[in-house]
Image: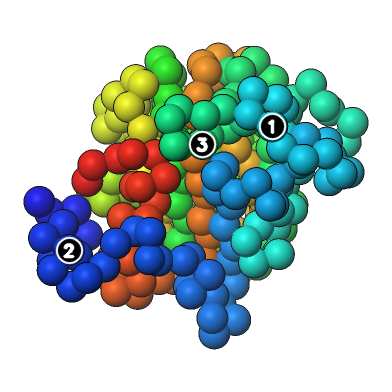
Amino acid sequence: MQLGIGIGIGQLRSGGFSPASFSPATLYSAAQLGDYITADDDTRQWQNQAGSVAPVVDSPIGKINGGQGVMSWGPGGANDARRPALRAAGALRYWEYDGIDDGMGTGISYGATLMDLFFVSQRATTPSFLQATAAYGGGNFLGVAQATTSSPDQNLGTPTYFINGNAIDSTRLAIFNATTPDVPFIMEVRGCNMVSLWSGLWTGFYPIYSSLQRVYAVVARQTLSTDERNLLMPWLAAKAGITL
């Protein structure tokens, strides 16, 4: 089966590769910019924003540290009510956002460096994506504005968008059409320039996006090679039980 990224499942298996043997840390071994978070790493998340209370399934999460120690995610200010809940579905872990006011973010910006961004999620009824509108103060690195047919926000370079390795248009409507409710997917944005007043990475929803959703993992790194992407995609898919 082809992944839509130039490599097939059979090729991965015949080469001895498995998602369990890959670590995203290798993507930063030469000091490349970026970081990653995953819901199944209990050593880098806590219930409170101070980072002093260990995570427990079905309890809120108030702080998440990136695997590279660059990003530190939180709901912002004293907004404990905006914390997502840590959930489990068998061996899988994810953060569940209530679709009302939950949101987690990090204020880090990588300036004019072009970044590749990956977001493993699952939506209910409305499009699921990293919150991206300046009107709500979230990082607009995905460049998806509020209107379903609008163009990406400004100052984002010329990013290209993919769902599970397949190219799509950069509108909310395209994201909606390319995904299925209650089925996890990998959203990818290649070549994103984060120079903006609102630069930063956010996950979550606000009332306009009312929809329960899951987030399994987020990865950001300056431009990936094809070989690096071919290693990362199966690892991301495994985080949500996705078959590519």
Q: Which residue is mark 1?
A: 56
SS type, badge 2: helix
Real-space Cα separation, disc 2 to disc 1, in angstroms: 34 Å
Question: Are the residues flagged by discs 2 and 1 in contact, CB closer than 8 Å?
Answer: no
| 240 or 213, nearer to the observer | 240
Q: Is residue 33 above or below residue 212?
A: below
Q: Position of residue 236 (x, y in %)?
A: 39, 51
Residue type at mark 3: give it: Arg
Determine whether, in the image, residue 217 is placed left or right of residue 104. Answer: left
SS type, badge 1: loop
Disc on the earlier residue, 3 or 1: 1
Residue 7 image-quadrant placement: bottom left
The local crowd at label 3, few if under 14, some if 14 to 19, many if 20 or more residues have their Cα within 10 Å, is many
Disc on the earlier residue, 2 or 1: 2
Real-space Cα separation, disc 3 to disc 1, in angstroms: 11 Å
Residue drawn at the location 62% of the way across and 61% of the way down: 67
Q: Position of residue 142 (x, y in %)?
A: 50, 46
Determine whether, in the image, residue 192 is placed left or right of residue 78. Answer: left
In this rendering, the label closer to the viewer, 3 or 1: 1
Q: Which residue is mark 2?
A: 13
Q: Which mark is residue 64?
A: none
Determine whether, in the image, residue 214 is placed left or right of residue 224. Answer: right
Determine whether, in the image, residue 182 is placed left or right of residue 9. Answer: right
